């Protein structure tokens, strides 16, 4: 069984693949300040809870945008499974050409998203990844990562509103029944949910016009689950990054 680990700024996702098929998935918070023993204990508990035996893992690959946690998960994989994890970086064959000015600046998660999209949907895609940051990625007609937009994610926007104002409350992300809120919570949720959806759809329309050919639209990322009903014309692929990691592992 293959273990794919995507270390994000907010959550670390774990996917367990057998014969290319995702069998199990779970997440824990990404907490760089915790010790390796604490993180390993949390991970081990979830493995046991899901009935996944250490002996069943015979391969692993890691994507990380948190440098301090990369070495932690490399050590945990070796400690628990007795194997060395592959790390998504320049040494791995990804199948994704990076057509930007500074390829070294591109996050590993973006390449994994593109690899997952290419395998599942083919080229000519625009990928909306709603994570800690909201990214809109272009996978062009040749299957190359051709650039993206990066903005504040829904969680960051909410935290900023609450921390930078005197009276706005914490809210649980929900789609209000109407765009115009009749109370503070609905008004805040409307901007966060409808505002995010309209912004992304507008960006996708503009990107499609800019490239001059139709693009398949894909939705992924941890915050996507809160706004899926607003993205009817998008394919919802919650495990896209993990699927991309599995595809890259198979290439190597």
Image: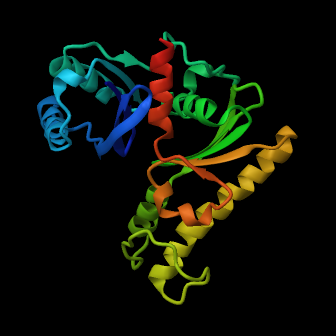
Question: Is residue 76 among the parts visible in the rendering?
Answer: no
Question: Is residue 27 among the parts visible in the rendering?
Answer: yes
Q: Nearer the viewer, residue 200 or 151?
A: 200
Q: Which quadrant holds residue 26?
A: top left
Q: Nearer the viewer, residue 132 or 52?
A: 52
The residue lying furthest to the bottom in this view is: 182
Q: Which quadrant holds residue 27?
A: top left
**Residue at (63%, 30%) from the top-left corner?**
118
**Residue at (19%, 19%) from the top-left corner?**
81
Residue 41, position as x, y percentages in the image: 12, 36
10 left or right of 97 in image: left
**Residue at (47%, 17%) from the top-left corner?**
250
**Residue at (77%, 45%) from the top-left corner?**
207
The residue lying furthest to the right in this view is: 212
Q: Which quadrant holds residue 11?
A: top left
Residue 51, position as x, y percentages in the image: 18, 39
Residue 115, position as x, y percentages in the image: 57, 28
228 left or right of 72 in image: right
Q: Nearer the viewer, residue 52 or 136?
A: 52
């Amino acid at each position: 069984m293959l273990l794919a680990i995507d270390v994000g700024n907010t959550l670390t996702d774990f996917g367990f693949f057998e014969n290319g098929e995702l069998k199990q998935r779970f997440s824990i918070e990404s907490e760089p300040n915790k010790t390796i023993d604490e993180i390993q204990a949390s991970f081990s508990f979830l493995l046991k809870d899901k009935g996944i035996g250490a002996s069943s893992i015979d391969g692993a690959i890691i994507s990380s945008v948190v440098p301090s946690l990369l070495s932690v998960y490399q050590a945990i994989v070796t400690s628990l499974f007795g194997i060395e994890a592959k790390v998504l970086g320049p040494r791995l064959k990804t199948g994704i050409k990076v057509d930007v000015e500074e390829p070294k600046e591109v996050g590993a998660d973006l390449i994994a998203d593109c690899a997952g999209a290419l395998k599942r949907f083919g080229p000519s895609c625009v990928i909306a990844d709603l994570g800690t940051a909201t990214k809109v990625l272009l996978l062009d007609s040749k299957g190359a990562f051709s650039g993206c937009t990066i903005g504040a994610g829904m969680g960051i926007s909410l935290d900023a509103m609450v921390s930078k104002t005197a009276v706005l409350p914490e809210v649980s992300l929900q789609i209000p029944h109407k765009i115009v809120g009749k109370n503070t919570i609905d008004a805040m949720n409307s901007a966060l949910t409808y505002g995010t959806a309209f912004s992304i759809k507008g960006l996708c329309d503009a990107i499609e016009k800019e490239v001059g050919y139709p693009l398949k639209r894909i939705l992924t990322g941890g915050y996507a689950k809160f706004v899926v009903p607003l993205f009817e014309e998008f394919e919802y692929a919650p495990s896209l990054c993990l699927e991309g990691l599995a595809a890259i592992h198979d290439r190597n």
